[in-house]
Image (cartoon, rainbow, N blue to C red):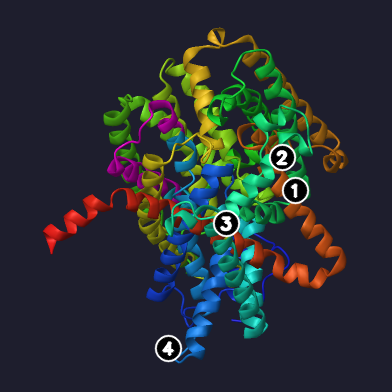
Amino acid sequence: MAEHSIPKHKFEGTPEEIERQWYLQVYRGDGMKQLTVRAVVTGAVLGSILSLTNLYIGLTAGWGFGVTLTACILSFTLWTTFQKMGLVKEPMTILENNCMQSTASSSGYSTGSTLVSAFAALVMIHGETMDTWLVMGWVFFMAVLGVTMAIPMKRQMINIEQLPFPTGLAAAETLQVLHSSGESKGLRAGIALMVSAVIAGISEFLMSGMDLIREGMWSLGKMVDQINNWVFSGNVLSSDWLTRTVKLSWEPIFLAAGAITGTRISLSLLFGGTLCWCIFIPSVQEAGLVGLNAGYKDLVQWSLWGGTACMVSAGILSFALQWRSILSSFSSLKSLFGMKRVSQKESLIDKLEAPMSWFIWGQIFGFLGLAIMAHYTFHMAWWASALAVVMTFFLALVASRVTGETDITPTGAMGKVVQLTFGVVTPGSVDLNISSANIASGAALASADLLTDIKSGYLLGANPKKQFLAQFLGIFSGTVFSVLGFQLMAQNVEIGGNDFPAPGGQTWRAVAEAMSGGLEQMHPVKLWSIAIGLAVGIVLTLIMHFYPRSKKFLPAPTALGLSWTFHWYYGLLFTLGALAVEFGKKKKKAFTEEYMFPIASGVIAGGALMAVFIIFTKIAKTYWPEISGWMSNVF
């Protein structure tokens, strides 16, 4: 094996020659530690903790952030520190960190995305959560289905076609830098992340948690409310509608989110939110369609239709315009299952790959689990469950390819495709509509996520079979932590209300109700909102597709639509965060490029975890008499 470096070019030749070049030039062999207990445990712990941050952000802003890079920085910092303290003989190897990354990603991201969308929609529809064990079963079986579904796709898309998977490439380069540039740079990034997390946590506690110490104590949150009331009470801005539909709140996690997502997306959120909450909603109120004192939950029932229509039309059209990728996905079906192998003799590469038997048994296990749960939970016919799983495979195939080429997983668009399909074949049932689409989108996301991590391992010379096992093991801890966290929040904080707008759930619910109840029963204002939203999404998508240079001058349609499902000030904070990064790059480019991601990730993790901690503490405070009595009986 040659000295390792991340390959900067594609290998060429026949599939057998391409794989042999990777084996000789990149694969590190089995001499370096990779799938170790400490790698899996570290990934499971970090991923489980970070799953709560994604759960909180998903329920508040409808956004999701991969945990891969954050987990890599934290793991490197922790184990390097342990080694310096003499607690361990050596820090993690680069391949151990790669396995840790796969476990953390599976635990912290793949298992929780369905909770903030489909399950949030079911909570809003029924006003209560499903049984915890049922939710765990759904999440676990979907993750198993998605992870094993990626096995036949990996060899074709990563080994042979060598699709870029940009996030996987970024993770590989991050690990390479951490492990090759000395300890100083990695430790600086880790310290920046943890310091920013502590500061954000303190800020969140001052905003929301001071009453845990003493009821009625003055806090930063009250100061912000006083400023908000003074600004919007006529002292500064005199328009009466500002006091009804626009508010300010200090939430640093959205500043950090804007720093990561960038200026265009953030400005799109601010622009769309201003149209919604400063023009549309006040007009609906003035027309007497909703009360002047109505809260967010009542107001969003009017705004979400236009926003959802914009997101759905833009997502599905963008998906369709990538028809070359879709055709390539289906044209490579034979290759996926090894039908075009040059040689029937098992090669060294074959022994490194996850065997097809894992794919077959994983699909059988996942399908049977989901079919049984769907039948007894929602009375879904067996044939409907089979149809959903069959659709899942083809949608996961396309999702993985699109992710590999563009780094954007069209999970939302694919979920809507399944919702529309089942709206035709099983009309009239909101639950069936959501649960069927839930299977497809959840499994497709897990497949694309696995391949993104596998790409990192491919570039670093890892053993793909060991990396697959690391990601599979992450499913267990991720399922437990994300589901228990969601259940506690959903049972004690209103999903779809002021604190947890749940934009993803709002969208899923809107599509399901429209498909099951019929558009003819809707108010004309909502129908016009849907028509205009569809048109805006289509027009913007077509313009950007045929005139790519116009993209930087036009709002992103998905962000534009999303802003109609959450608070106005989210877009403001996103924009301030993005502009701060742009300013930093002009003044101190090197500093900003080195510290922007660690600081932003730390703010998101620290702020979200503190918010979750406060919620859980308040829940425990409410039930403390019962907990205390139970402990007394036990001990």
Q: Is residue 306 above or below residue 146?
A: above
Q: Is residue 456 visible?
A: no
Query: At which x and y percent is residue 394?
Result: 52, 37
Bin the neighbour count of mark 4 within 10 Å (Cα to Cα): few under 14, some 14-19, many 20 and up: few
> In the rendered structure, does residue 130 fall within the stretch colored magenta?
yes
Q: Quadrant of the C terminus?
A: bottom left
Residue on which disc 4 sits: 87
Residue under label 1? 575
Image quadrant holding the N terminus, namely bottom right
**SS category of the residue bearing label 1:** helix
Residue type (three-letter) at the residue carrying disc 1: Thr
Q: Name the residue carrying label 2.
A: 269
Q: Earlier in the sequence, mark 1 or mark 4?
A: 4
Q: Marks 3 and 4, Cα distance to the nearest angstrom? A: 33 Å
233 or 327, nearer to the observer? 233
Q: Which residues are magenta?
A: 121-147
Q: Mark 2: which secondary structure? A: helix
Q: CA distance from mark 1 to mark 4?
A: 43 Å
* Callout 2–callout 4 Cβ contact below 8 Å: no
Measured as percent of width and height from the top left, residue 500 is found at 51, 40
Give left or right: position of 609 versus 131. right
**What amino acid type should be assigned to the residue bearing mark 3?**
Thr
Q: Label 3, on which residue? A: 452
Q: CA distance from mark 3 to mark 2?
A: 27 Å
